[in-house]
Amino acid sequence: MEVSEYDLNGNGRIDKQEREIMLEDRRLEMMDRDAKRDTERALTIACAAGMLLYPFLILVSAWLGLDHASSLLADIAPVYSVAASGVVVGYFGFNAMGARK
């Protein structure tokens, strides 16, 4: 944080109004980072749940007599698994890299 960034009147000091602007800016940045983490976590949970439930979806569709649907689901299972696991691995990998800072 540079003083000049929040020193709006150019007097070399951060006055009370400028301090309030600075604190509001920091608060908004924290809220944005928190919302980003929440979104990433929700996406990762959805992908992990999808990877766990995908085989059951194939079994249920076969059990309901939807043989063509279960065949199609089984055909795209490898692609879905790679894509969903990539999201999960990326989430945990970037969190691990961020924890090192």
Image (cartoon, rainbow, N blue to C red):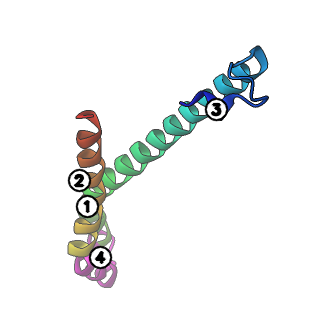
Which residue position is annotated with label 2?
89
For the record, the magenta segment spans 62-76
Which residue position is annotated with label 1?
86
* Tags 1 and 2 touching, CB below 8 Å: yes
Does 29 sit left or right of 40 as displayed? right
Marking on residue 77 = none
Viewer-side label of 2, 3:
3
Disc 3/disc 4 C-alpha distance (Å): 58 Å
Which residue position is annotated with label 3?
4
Disc 2/disc 3 C-alpha distance (Å): 41 Å
Q: Is residue 45 visible?
A: yes
Disc 3/disc 1 C-alpha distance (Å): 42 Å
Disc 1/disc 2 C-alpha distance (Å): 5 Å
Element type where label 4 sits in the image: helix
Instruction: Tell me if residue 88 is in the magenta stretch.
Output: no
Reply above or below: 14 against 99.
above
Question: What residue type is disc 4 on?
Answer: Leu
Reply above or below: 99 against 94.
above
Reply above or below: 97 against 56.
above
